[in-house]
Image: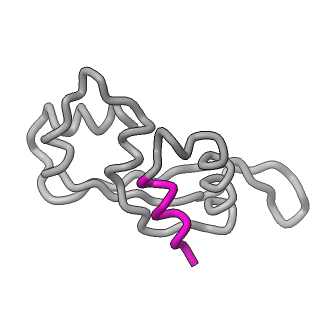
Amino acid sequence: MVTIARHEVDLDETEGTIYFDVIGAGEDLYGNPVEVDAFTLSYSMEDLKRVNWTNFDGHKLLNLGAIVKASPAGKKLIADYCAGNEDESDMFCTSADQLQ
């Protein structure tokens, strides 16, 4: 995500908001492994243009995004991520706690 976000800023052609659809591992109705739509994050181009990309990683990028929607599988994926990375992505994990 960091590479794509930085690319969009470098192009300087995108205005407004960009969205990332995050895909995760899940199961189908029969218990077979499948890729599922986990969650969608939105990012303001105004925020992304302010980033110093030299020392910026994916954990920090999550803090700038807004969770637009999350499937049940996505909520589990986020909870699992936050269980081990809450310090690095504290704002993201706090907003994820508010998901219904």
State the residue at coordinates (32%, 50%): 64
Is 25 positioned to the left or the right of 50 in the image?
right
Q: Residue furthest top?
A: 54
* 63 lies above or below 96: above
**Which quadrant: the C terminus?**
bottom right
Quadrant in which residue 53 is drawn:
top left
Is 99 inside the magenta-drawn segment?
Answer: yes
Is 24 positioned to the left or the right of 40 in the image?
right
Q: Position of residue 62 (x, y in %)?
A: 41, 47
Is 49 inside the magenta-drawn segment?
Answer: no
Q: Residue furthest bottom?
A: 100
Q: Position of residue 42 (x, y in %)?
A: 33, 58
Quadrant in which residue 78 is drawn:
bottom right
State the residue at coordinates (19%, 36%): 51
* 57 lies above or below 44: above
Looking at the rendered structure, the number of numbered marks drawn on it comes to 0
Q: Which residues are magenta?
A: 91-100
Is 97 positioned to the left or the right of 53 in the image?
right
Q: Position of residue 58 (x, y in %)?
A: 42, 35
Q: Residue furthest right?
A: 30
Snapshot colouring: one colour
State the residue at coordinates (18%, 49%): 47
**Which quadrant: the N terminus?**
top left
State the residue at coordinates (23%, 32%): 7
Nearer to the camera, 45 or 14: 45
Nearer to the camera, 71 or 62: 62
Magenta: main secondary structure: helix
